[in-house]
Image: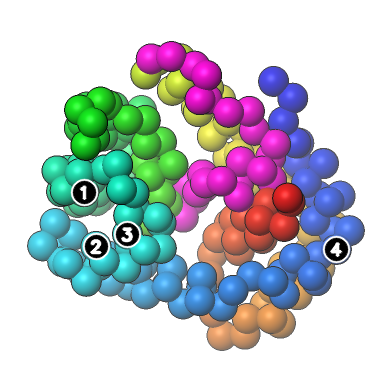
Amino acid sequence: MKYRTAEDLRDLLLEDHESVVNQIPQEKLDVYIYLQQLYQDTYVPDDHLFQFVFRYFFRLDNPSLTKEFEDQYFKVMEEQRGEERPNIVQITKRLYEVKNHKGNPTMQFPLAAAMLHTINPEFPTYDGDIVKAFDFSSTYHLSGFDKKMKRYMEQYQHTFRTYNELLDEESMQPLFEHFDERFPGYDLPKVKKLDLIVAQFGNKIS
């Protein structure tokens, strides 16, 4: 599969970096920081405020998903607290086993990635905007958990490696400097800034 490389993204981001950064909604930073702070001091399965904000921010409010799925999701999130290297395959598999309203298992890899990202921002997000930014191929036509998971992991690992390459690129510094000028006083890890920038770039792609 040919996805956008670190070099591809670097050139595209630097081409119009001020515009991309300027279009990032400040609400995204505010809600992310709020969730991070709340997560550190709460017991997720019992914290309905945390769950409410998380559902809105990471689009967990999917009509096809059941209350049982949400309960399992936040239970797994709490169990992963303190895990140095959470296993996203096992997490996705546990969520897959919870049937939707039609009685079918559903592949919820983006939500598994959101869980890991909340626990540790070193793990990238994976949503529709990231998919567009990297020009990832769809998994819709693939049948069964294993085939879909293999494709998701290939793409997720590509995202992780690309972020690491971009973070080491000196030429990317003007982009991060403009981010700090646009959002002064926000103490975000550099990798989170990059994640927001790449997602916003993907959001601009029609």
What's the residue type where badge 2 is placed? Gln
Q: At numbered mark 2, what does the secondary structure look like: helix, strand or loop?
A: helix
**Quarter occupied by residue 96:** top left
Q: Earlier in the sequence, mark 4 or mark 2?
A: 4
**Marks 3 and 2, how far apart at CA:** 6 Å
**Marks 3 and 4, how far apart at CA:** 32 Å
Q: Is residue 139 in sight in this rendering?
A: yes
Which numbered circle lies on residue 51? Answer: 2
Residue indicated by mark 1 = 70
Dot 2 alpha-carbon crowd within 10 angstroms: few under 14, some 14 to 19, many 20 or more:
some
Dot 4 alpha-carbon crowd within 10 angstroms: few under 14, some 14 to 19, many 20 or more:
few
What's the residue type where badge 4 is placed? Asp
Residue indicated by mark 4 = 16
Query: Which residues are drawn in magenta?
Result: 120-144
Q: Residue at x 37, y 30 (%)?
A: 107
Q: At numbered mark 1, what does the secondary structure look like: helix, strand or loop?
A: helix
